[in-house]
Amino acid sequence: MTVTESTPSVSVPDHIARQVVLPEGHREEQPLFAAYQWLRENAPLAKVHVEGYDPLWLVAKHADIMEIEKQPAVFPSGGGAKPGSHNPILQNQAGDAFTRSLTGGSLRILEAVPYLDPPEHTMVRNIAAEWFRPASLKRWEDRIRELAREAIAARLHPGPNDLDIVEGFALSYPLHVIMTLFGVPAEDEPRMMALTQDFFGTADPEAQRADVTPLTPEAAAQQWSAAIRDFYAYFDALVEARRAEPRDDLASIIANARRPDGELYPKEVAYGWFIAIATAGHDTTSTTLAGILEVLSQHPGQFARVKSDPSLIPGLIEEGLRWVSPVKHFVRQASQDYLLRGQQIAEGDRLMLLYQSANRDADVFEAPGEFRLDRKPNRQIAFGYGPHMCIGQHLSRLELRVMLEELLPRLVSLEITGDRKLLQTNFVGGLRRLPMRVELA
Ligand code: HEM
């Protein structure tokens, strides 16, 4: 049963709340986007109670997400030190209980940036912030271009190619780029891929690990913590190796980072970074790439335009990010009472920031349901906002631009040949399967 506590008293129907909150509500795009639209139009900020979950506010509007995210003291992400911490990623009650049982009462399962708040967040984020700046990334552009060319050559041949554009093409390239720059050898990439999918796909029946019982909430939580354990074991060896022998890679920067007092950070901080990069660093970008190829196949006019004018590629990417929004939510928790959009948020209330909804907000985007590669301005919020705004955004744009610059001139046609399938998750995901015929010159 859904209970709405918003004023004016618009009750959020149970099916709308479940569609947005539950991972299985994200299996189909049409009802999900209809639910977002209903929220924006009828209850843009509404408190709901979906069975199995603690009550939470659904934040459907672009402006409200920005207002929340720019005030990390009022709306912290992780809520400070253990055990008062909370979870910036939505889990159900069983999942949260399981996490608490693992950590002794805290929901801060990782020492990773999404779980931290300023000033601790600022310090830890700064370890890698310089590396991720556009000026620093420039030196990797040629290497990324080589990797894009290799990815095309390995996966597509001249003439028609019938393939699943996700598994068969888009998935591997961003992983390969980030692992190469990070310093993980190519032979370990399948392991990173499997771990990431465990991490993000816990609610998708097709992504269940074999060593846990499928589909119960407890199993999803167990799968998550098993994935973290595996990551730790792998990354511990990496930290040791880079401390013993630093190289010109991101792993070395993180493994050897020192606190202001000159001491090395505890290894958990390095693990947290490694996991954040390994997980956030590729599914997001590959999903966006697959989504852009899908949408180009549906809009032959825009496909022809961008093919003949590569200067349109950056605009195509911004619109692709708006369109796909592969990160569906993060959660904040109010540290004090706060009045937002005429609603009284109480201290301790949790808020689910719905980026996909914000990116279809008609107050910000003209004709939000239309894909327009030359949309101007495009204030898409797919990378979030405020101090947690995606640190990988410039890398992701660079990867996408280079890939599209290499691919588009050779692309003769794109055609969808089968049914699409989405990853069943309310966190990070999008296309999981999309059969296509891709014709290369
Ligand atoms: C299309 C690609 C991507 C999208 C849409 C995306 C989206 C996001 C979003 C929405 C957030 C949360 C922002 C907030 O809380 O306001 C985030 C945070 C983050 N992203 Fe990305 N991301 C992408 C690619 C990447 C890449 C390539 C990397 C790294 C290689 C990365 C690393 C991170 C990290 C470490 C954080 C946490 C930052 C913090 O808490 O300070 N992301 N991303």
Image (cartoon, grey):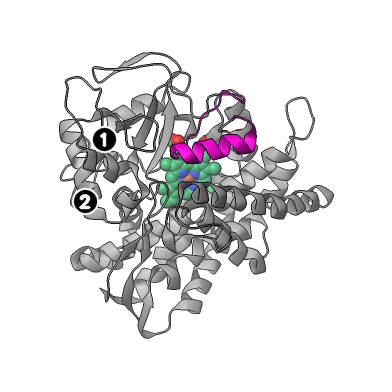
**Percent of width and height locating residue 185:** 68, 64
Please report the residue visible at 56 percent of the width from the left and 57 percent of the height from the top. Answer: 212
Label 1 CA crowd tier, 10 Å (few <14, some 14–19, many 20+)? few
Picture coordinates of residue 29, whole percent (x, y): 26, 54
Asked whether disc 2 touches disc 1, contact meaning CB atoms under 8 Å apart, the reply is no
* Front one among 151 and 239: 239
Q: Which mark is residue 1?
A: 1
N-term mark: 2 or 1: 1
Q: Residue 377, which numbered label?
A: none
Which image quarter: residue 303?
bottom left
Determine which residue is flagged by label 2: 31
Secondary structure at badge 2 equals helix
> Residue extending furthest right?
244
Q: Amino acid at mark 2?
A: Pro
139 relative to 201 in the view: left or right: right
Please state which of residues 222 and 434 is positioned toward the viewer in this rendering.
222
For the point 50% across and 66% down, the residue is 172
Q: Position of residue 268 (x, y in %)?
A: 70, 39
Can you tell which of label 2 and label 1 is closer to the viewer? 1
Q: Is residue 365 above or below residue 197?
A: above
Q: Is residue 89 magenta?
A: yes
410, above or below 88, in the image: below
Q: Quadrant of the N terminus?
A: top left
Which residues fall within the magenta stretch?
A: 80-105
Q: Is residue 143 toward the left or the right of residue 17 in the image?
A: right
Q: What's the residue at 59%, 47% (across, down)?
A: 225
Circle 1: element type: loop
User: What amino acid is found at the position of numbered circle 1 in the picture?
Assistant: Met
